Amino acid sequence: MPQSRNQAFTMNRRRAVGVLGAAAGITCAGLLPGRAAATPAEADALMKTLTGAAAPSEGKVKLHLPQIAENGATVLMKVTVDSPMTANDYVKVVHVVAEGNPLPAVASFHFTPKSGKAEVSTRIRLGKTQNVHAVAIMSNGTVWHTKEEVKVTAGGC
């Protein structure tokens, strides 16, 4: 039986949606629990790559995370760095790294003296209980580090 032009278009659109849905399912299959998580050694290697040869010192960086995250898909995080944010002394970048996510790199935040203060707040995803690191690279080349453990009851990655 011949199809009208509208029916043929509808069938093609439905097929396209079906193909896209199947592709999305295949893509998301890699994000399901059971996918390998980064190790603390991989997170450490990433931080060394991000900071170059500089050895990080403790202090100046404060990482605010909940001790227990009931939903790892939306974990509130705030990072602050003690800096005058002047033309001669400011935070250039803050990197956030998670030890147990499928990929350890979480976020990087870039600042200038015009930023006013080195502070950022956002939500992140955490796949399981793990340490989260914040590394600040200053304009003078010094590197500051801190870490916090977050207990995740329901993973978000």
Image: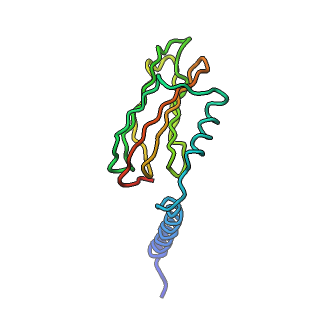
Q: Quadrant of residue 50?
A: top right
- Is 103 in front, or is 38? 38
Residue 100, placed above or below residue 61: below
Q: Residue at left 46%, top 13%? A: 84
Residue 150, placed above or below residue 111: below
Question: In the orientation shown, which residue stands out farthest toward the right?
Answer: 53
Determine whether, in the image, residue 46 is placed left or right of residue 150: right
Residue 137, placed above or below residue 101: above
Q: Residue at left 53%, top 66%? A: 26
Q: Position of residue 30 (x, y in %)?
A: 53, 61
Q: Residue at left 50%, top 49%? A: 100
Q: Position of residue 113 (x, y in %)?
A: 51, 17
Q: Position of residue 49 (x, y in %)?
A: 64, 36
Q: How is the image coloured?
A: rainbow
Q: Position of residue 133 (x, y in %)?
A: 49, 36
- Is 111 in front, or is 157? 157
